Amino acid sequence: MVAYIDKLSEFGKSFQIKVIYSLIHDVKFLQDIFDIVESSYFEREEHQWVVEQVITYYTEYKKCITMDVLALSVKSVQSPSFQESVKKTIKEIYTTDKLDDVDFVKDQFENFCKNQKLKKAILASTDLLKRGEYDEIKVLVDNALKAGMSKEIGHNWTEHVEARLTNVRKASPVYMKVIDDITAGGLGSGEIGVVAAPSGIGKTWVLCQIGYNAVMHGHNVLHITLELSDDYVARRYDTILTGKPFSVLQEDSSILKEKLKAVRGNLDIRQFPTRSVSTHGLEAFIEKVIQIKPVDLIVLDYADLLDSGKKSTGNSYDDMGNIYEELRGISGKLGIPIWTATQTNRDSLSSDVIGASGIADSYKKVMTADFIMSVIRKDIDKLNNKARVHIIKNRFGPDGMTFSASMDTNIGKFHIYETQVDNKKVEEQQETLEKQQLKQKYESYKKKPTVSNDFG
């Protein structure tokens, strides 16, 4: 925070040069402060002259003044000595290169102008107060408070067509071809992807696979776990990397150490006890991490285990919905996509495909998330290292499709096949496999030797 300053001269010459530079180069900044900036705020006459030219030009053309226009205007200055001073000032403005703090300069100047506007309104209210014209005082002060507000309305459909055509959404791939194809490249800033599955199906394995893919392609991943220990999560990444159970890696650590040399990105894993951190605490932690190192992707295992915080309504439906809304806000504010998981209800265990109705606790999760895929594995699927992935929601493309997947949690393998699955055929195949397995069990039972009954 900067203490209240009554005169712009107290900021110094360099500060004022940077302000004028911004007025000439940043049309949005000029647009926002146009109704509160005055040339008289500036200390030097040559600075005042340049600001007056900027204001005059913007009034007529609604654009920032150019160097060519300034050069022509300088010729109209009558005094040779003052003309020389103005030329020197313009050159100084255009050649200034120490602009690391220009955003700070613009913020401080905007606050200064607002304070000056409000100060004038208060002083002008003195006579109105004596006359008892209170409504006029309110109008005067309200206008002063509104001055300097952003004039940007938003995206204009017809005027901003070029911006739409050239503005490409920057997405972080999942490096699973099926998902990247239907999401136009993955998730971007302000977007949340959710893996929905019943307990014991392997949500953490899927999230680890997403994190692993990103790291192996050179990205920096922050994996936050609210259920398993950081050491245990790291072991799962070890298994995915090597394709071997961690017990094997403990016997021969050279396998893991050699494979780790090929890792291109960075992975940090942080554990928080279940329900011990809210979305606000999570945001504060991520911001601290970003100050130390860049983060390209956040894996949160998983959002349902966050604390609802002080804003708890006592209603689990609203609390869980609020958590997902706040997470999406964090993603947008920090510019980092988030992948998380959610629990499905118990009925979904018997389903061949899990849809939106299977999401537990709050349908607001479905409303808030940008992409949701469910994963289901029945007992027969686990025996055959198979799974089914259903696209519940997709803001960026088609949804409602079901894909077959291979999933072996013993070696950390999860792969979604590109061919879509006919759900009716899945049910028929499931029934056939179950019959075959029952028949095998029955045949095995018949081959067992009978045990004599001494009491028979």
Image: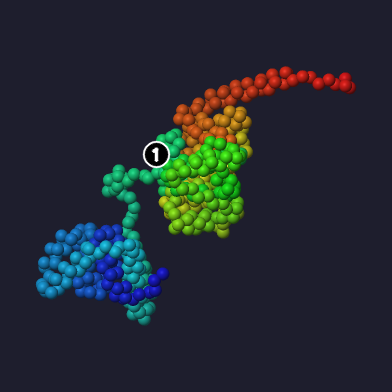
Q: Nearer the viewer, residue 325 or 373?
A: 373
Q: In which quadrant is the N terminus drawn? A: bottom left
Q: Is residue 279 left or right of residue 51?
A: right
Badge 1 is on which residue?
A: 184
Residue at x-position 62% and y-position 24%: 434
Q: Is residue 381 left or right of residue 178?
A: right
Q: Nearer the viewer, residue 233 or 394?
A: 233
**Residue 254 image-quadrant placement:** top right
Residue 5 x, y percent position in the rendering = 35, 75
Above or below 31: residue 413 = above
Residue at x-position 58% and y-position 28%: 384
Three-letter residue code for mark 1: Ala
- Judge whether residue 176 can be spotted in this image: yes
Q: In which quadrant is the C terminus drawn? A: top right
Above or below 438: residue 43 = below
Residue lying at the far bottom of the rendered structure: 130
Q: Is residue 439 left or right of residue 19?
A: right
